[in-house]
Amino acid sequence: MADKKIDLHKLKLPYDLKRLSISQCEDICAQIRSILIETVSENGGHLASNLGTVELTVALHRVFDSPKDKIVWDVGHQAYTHKILTGRLDRFDTLRKEGGISGFCRPDESEHDAFVSGHSSNSISAALGIATAMKLNGDKHAAIAVMGDGAFTGGMIFEGLNNAGKSDTNMIVILNYNEMSISKNVGGMAKYLSEMRTKDSYKKTKSAVERVLDVTPVVGKPIKKAVRESKNAFKNMILHSTMFEDLGFEYIGPLDGHNIEELEAGLRAAKSIGKPVFVHVNTVKGKGYAPAEENPGEYHGVGKFEIATGNPDVVTADSFSSVMGKELCRMGRQNKKICAVTAAMKYGTGLQYFAKSFPERFFDVGIAEEHAVTFCGGLASMGYVPVFAVYSTFLQRDYDQLIHDLAISGDHAVICVDRAGIVGSDGETHQGIFDVSFLTAVPNIVIYSPSNYKELELCLHKAVEEEKGTAVVRYPRGSDKSVYDKTDCGTGYEYKDFGGKYLIMTYGRLYDNAYKAAQILKEQGIVCDLIKLVKIFPIDKQITETVKCYDRVFFFEEAYFSGSLSEKYAAVCKNVESTAIHGFVKHGESDALLDELGLSNFS
């Protein structure tokens, strides 16, 4: 007789999961996948990575006792199922919407979210800290770090592994291996994990895993019995001679990441050991939705899309990222010294065009932004012109390298800062609001902030062909929607003198709002002059002299106030009033957030 069908919405989650049969859990997984596809198709978000971790998440919550056991997700873009199973099912349709639940893990959102997760490769270090604190408190529960194999291209993972393996804490590291991060994984670790996925050495003997289970207290023999009864579980649950063992971990895997019974057997074994354990799980990114399985990179992070066809409703070719990528490709044909560098974001930054045309001069270093900058320093020291395209939020990881490995030497490299400013639904961990503050503190750096596509192309040429040292070109997420007159586009600044007593200053995409505001004020009989900064730093003394001539100057800035340009101008020109960003900015639609911040309607 078949098990009774269970309605996910009627369960008390995550606690009721433990009383379900395997077949009922499989049905629950199907319901979750439908919810994921439906919600992300409406709200946008991370789809493929979440579809791949459904069974793993269900198994985690059946074996462990969250929140007493602490689950740390390495980047929350694989934790949507975790959110569904931990009290947020009824609000899941608000995912990434203003006032709704976050697309990433947030401890202030749920006690089941053990740690903030927005940037990759930090989970082992965080989980080790948690496990150490629990040990000091006499708490026998486990800390579990869950990551995709893309995280293993980031150096912080290895720092964490090196310390965790010898820690003697109750800590479990789970590797969700699917051969993808955002772009296809690259490098030696990706190759090593791929070989581990397919090699047959784990089939050598059944006695190896049984010996471990024989000495495991309380649950060892029952698990051994379950393993004997499951051919697949036995084949996959065995200790390897791996680098993880060399670092001090017990190793279990590879496990079939879509087989709940096998996952539970492996996780229960890991739970029973009480010391650092590494669990290797193989999954399919995009599992259960054909378009995402066939194109997991495209469905890693998506906007709205049509479920039946999988077609997104956003034309990504019309974006600052694509314009930069195509122009750099054209420049690469003329200048054989130009190299393009990305940190696992080839498509996100528009570098796919350069990669296709000049594969020998294109370098994807994986999720390793720190390495990327120092690698660029090495290229630059040999006379090449590296162009590193990186999201503003991820550039935050590079501060030491920017100073030590680029700025001090004075060698010429270009940083293209994508997603500068408000990015919207990804929230605090991804808003690009800090780059101006920390970049302007670096000596001898030059920063451009174009406000339209034409200016972006001009600034890219200026940065690559004419500047010395470190040159930065920063631009926003999305497309150019500006309507102001672009006849006088340049790379310095643009001054509109209408004879007013007041001046509006800004840079980047906000200039279009400033232009509209000036038009509205003019109709009301208030004349405001305009300054559009393009080369925003170093500060031009000629501009400051002009600014000092006005009764009042209103500087609008899509950046964090402390260390901002408006703060710097206000220190020199006492008539400057700043409207900038104070504190972190939560998730929501970009236009709505700009409106709340006072950056959409200057009048």
Image: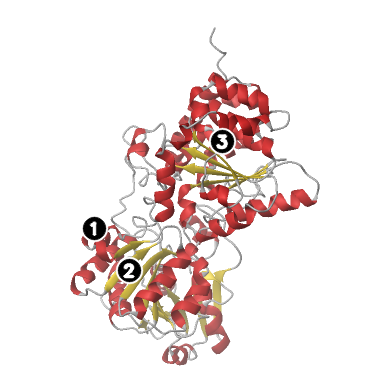
Residue with the most extreme top position: 1
Q: Nearer the viewer, mark 1 or mark 2?
A: 1
Q: Position of residue 481 (x, y in %)?
A: 34, 61
Apparent side of residue 392 relative to residue 331 in the rendered image (left or right): right
Q: Amino acid at mark 1?
A: Lys
Q: Is residue 284 left or right of residue 55?
A: left
Q: Which residue lies under the disc numbered 1?
A: 356
Judge whether 480 appears above or below 439 on screen: above
Amino acid of disc 3: Thr
Q: Nearer the viewer, mark 2 or mark 3?
A: 3
Name the residue carrying label 3: 57
Q: Crowding at label 1, few (<14), some or many (≥20) Cα neighbours within 10 Å?
A: few
* Mark 1 / mark 2, whichever is N-terminal: 1
Q: Is residue 29 above or below residue 343?
A: above
Label 3 element class = helix
Q: Are marks 1 and 3 in contact (CB under 8 Å)?
A: no
Residue on which disc 2 sits: 452
- Sequence-wise, the earlier of marks 2 and 3 is 3
Residue at image position (66%, 42%) is 112
How far is disc 1 from disc 3 in space, using C-alphas?
Answer: 37 Å
Out of 323 and 376, give the one closest to the viewer. 376
Q: Position of residue 25 (x, y in %)?
A: 55, 24
Tell me if residue 213 comes above or below residue 591 in the rendering: above
Does residue 215 appear in this view? yes
